[in-house]
Amino acid sequence: MRFIICIFFVIVTSHLNSANIESDLLEFIDLVPKNRIAILFGRHFLFDTRFRTAVNYLRSSDFEILMQEQISKSPEVHNIIEYLGKEIDLNVIPLKIRRFINRLRPSSAQEYGSVRGSLSFIQEITQLLPDYEIARLIRDKKSTDPEFGELYEKIKDVKFRELVYSAKNSESMAFAMDVLRSNQIEVDQILEIAFDKINTWSQFY
């Protein structure tokens, strides 16, 4: 789904059980051009039916139930959390997403204009991300904060990717993946772009 990529840091890192890690990663959020992303969000929400379907699902109680009853109980998802060595409360993520979406929802079509060309929302967001600045901050944080450095090394390691794809393709997550995809949440595209970005940032240093 095109929307999740722009709130990835907000959803996941804000629930890590570490004040230092949370403080570090808030600095990455500050690098993201949030106002421009809000405008893109507004355009797509108004004019892209599939995008609107995905956003409305993420705001719904159905997503909250899916997180509680399916995703948070998956053994493969717990393997990812265990590998990272951090406590993540998955059940508070739906509320976090709902609050974020409510701040971005448009008030009128005139405020945002029309959707530009055929570029998807996720492609436009990717173009807005300041890759060099993000990579430089990663380098600086790794040299000054061992806890952050350890977490980032785990995330960019091939084992993390294997665990993520193992969870996505697991029997315990099959129902959840079907539900997400049926609500226009493009899981495969999200993962592909997320890991591509991690590789891009790693190549700067």
Image (cartoon, rainbow, N blue to C red):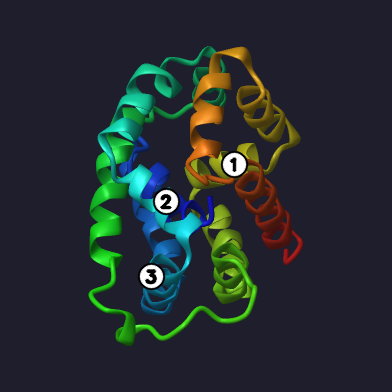
Q: Earlier in the sequence, mark 1 or mark 3?
A: 3
Closer mark to the observer between disc 1 and disc 2:
2
From mark 2 to mark 3, how far is it between C-alphas?
A: 11 Å
Give the residue at x 63% y 72%: 119
Q: Earlier in the sequence, mark 1 or mark 2?
A: 2
Disc 2 target residue: 53
In which image quadrant can residue 71 be found? top left
Amino acid beneath label 1: Val
Give the residue at x 57% y 39%: 150
Residues at discs 1 and 3 in contact (Cβ within 8 Å) = no
Amino acid beneath label 2: Thr
Labelled disc at residue 46: 3
Q: Position of residue 167 (x, y in %)?
A: 61, 23
Indicate the secondary structure of the residue bearing disc 1.
helix
Q: Earlier in the sequence, mark 2 or mark 3?
A: 3
In which image quadrant can residue 161 be found? top right
Labelled disc at residue 1: none
Amino acid beneath label 3: Leu
